[in-house]
Image: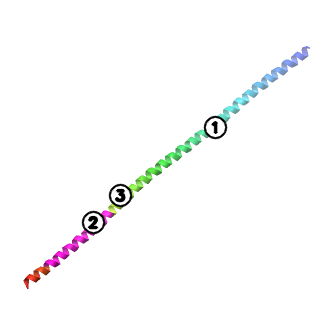
Amino acid sequence: LFQGAVRGMILRNGIARMDSACCEIQRIWRGYRSHVKYVITIENIVRVQCLVRMRHCKKAYTTRQTAASHIQESYRTWRLREAEQRKFRAAMLLQSVVRGMGVRRKHDI
């Protein structure tokens, strides 16, 4: 009888220790799993932030590039227009000089 009670007490103590160890293992495993999920979530957040920033920078670059192209186009058009106006004024001056010479010759004769 006494031996049975001791064996029961040893068995109950062993089960209690196993139960405690099982709870400890589960606690550690759940903490690890939670940490891994946290790290993955942080990595995904960083990835999304990176993509958003990249898209914003590309949009800003495209806007600046378009503005620069427009300025270049306007300047080149202005420069061509100025060159054409100089040619036109030179042609008008030449024509007026030639006509004036013709009129003076006509009246001198």
Q: Distance between the residues labelled 1 and 3?
A: 51 Å
| Residue 61 sits above or below residue 12 on the image | below
Q: Residue furthest left?
A: 108
| Residue 87 sits above or below residue 32 on the image | below
Residue 30 covered by magenta stretch? no
Q: Name the residue under label 2.
A: 82
Residue 83 rendering spot, x and y as whole percentages: 28, 68
* The N terminus: image quadrant: top right
In the image, the segment drawn in magenta is 77-100
Q: How far apart are marks 2 and 3 (CA)?
A: 16 Å
Lower sequence index among marks 2 and 1: 1
Q: Name the residue under label 3.
A: 71
Q: What residue type is labelled 2?
A: Glu
Q: Do the residues bearing badges 2 and 1 touch, measured as CB atoms within 8 Å? A: no
Circle 2 packing at 10 Å, graded few (<14), some (14-19), many (20+), is: few
Point 56% across, 44% down: residue: 47
* Rendered image: mark on residue 37: 1
- Kind of element beneath mark 3: helix
Lower sequence index among marks 2 and 3: 3
